[in-house]
Amino acid sequence: MVKSRTIIATPPGVTIKEQLSDRGMSQKEFSARMELTEKHISRLINGEVRLTTDVANRLEMVLGIPANIWNNLEAIYQEKLFKAEQENMMDEDIEIARKLPYKEMVRNGWIKEETNKPEKVITLRKFFEVVRLGCIESQLINKIACRKLAETERSDYALIAWAQKAKLEARKIDVKVINVEKLKSSLNNIRAMTRKLPEEFCPELRKVLSDCGIAIVFLPHIGGSFLHGATFYDGKKIVMGLTVRGKDADKFWFSLFHEIAHIIHGDIGKSEGLSDADEQQADIFSKNILIPEKLYEDYVHIGSFSKEGIMRFANKIGIDAGIVVGRLQKDNFIQYNWHNELKCKYQIS
């Protein structure tokens, strides 16, 4: 027997059990008369196997109830069973839909708005390409290499939605065969792009990464997700999604090289997910690519943290001055309200 909010699906086996009880017949005797195993009879009574035409005909011979009645009971049971399962699935999916950043997905144009809860669920199922939303809870999340600043249920569901949109957009991008060695050799070229504006570097960055088998996608930030970027496999390509959280250029570039580190270090697709050590290693890689460790140590030792001193150092190492400001603020060499005029703000879509 299967129940849902409004439906009870009762298998024909309940009627068989009643007939055996009325006749004082054991299941062992009944199975012998039916020439079926006791296990099969037990499963039939419990609704675990279908009542076939063959079994219906046997039931007519043994119990004297016409085969068409048994076939009809089975048909009614299967119909109610389907409806009950669908109703239960819908109720479960409505709860999951509440956890997803639905309003922001609508606002960003990822899905159309629905006021009816079942229609909302159907729209979300189509977006995620699943028969039920429960599938997304175990899908992808442990195999996504990402940079986010907090771990919460809300941020996890936002990540799943965000990654799905990145996957859908990446399908429109042609890439070459994945080539990690080529990516390594492109690092200095990518780093030099920090001194350019988005309208200049975005096409260049897309081209360089696509030649390495990586489809880069820029997406809006999802509130409460604490997300900066995510990278994962989709078929024979690597998808890298980035968001300009807070529009800060220094955070954008740090996140980009953090995701590149995950690719180079082979972190993508780990079945057990990323460890704290993996994330720390990617952070170290990113900050040292942007500002080489030895050069940074020499610079902070001198302590030239004026606007002019920062610009001289940035020009010397060939990087955007705002990235130096962000690093000095992060490492507490200067206050967070110092020299922010040197920081660029990006609007990337």
Image (cartoon, grey):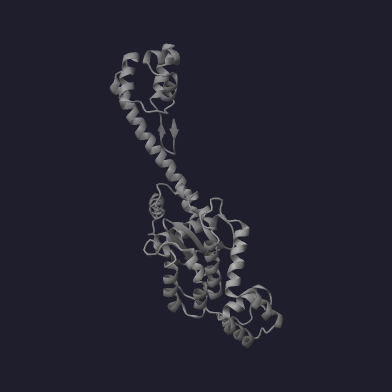
Location of residue 286 (image quadrant): bottom right
- From this view, report whether residue 195 is shown above or below residue 237: below
Q: Residue at x 34, y 28 (%)?
A: 74
Q: Residue at x 60, y 78 (%)?
A: 324
**Residue 349 shows in the view:** no
Left or right of 71, for residue 229: right
Left or right of 276, for residue 191: left
Seen from the viewer's position, the closer of residues 176 and 131 is 176
From the top left corner, tell me how far across and down residue 297 is, in percent: 68, 77
Seen from the viewer's position, the closer of residues 28 and 224 is 28
> Quadrant location of the N terminus?
top left
Q: Residue at x 50, y 74 (%)?
A: 190
From the top left corner, tell me how far across and down residue 94 is, in percent: 45, 49
- From this view, report whether residue 3 is shown above or below residue 106: above
Q: Residue furthest bottom?
A: 308
From the top left corner, tell me how far across and down residue 56 is, in percent: 32, 21
Seen from the viewer's position, the closer of residues 326 and 86 is 326
From the top left corner, tell me how far across and down residue 91 is, in percent: 45, 45
- From this view, report whether residue 58 is shown above or below residue 202: above
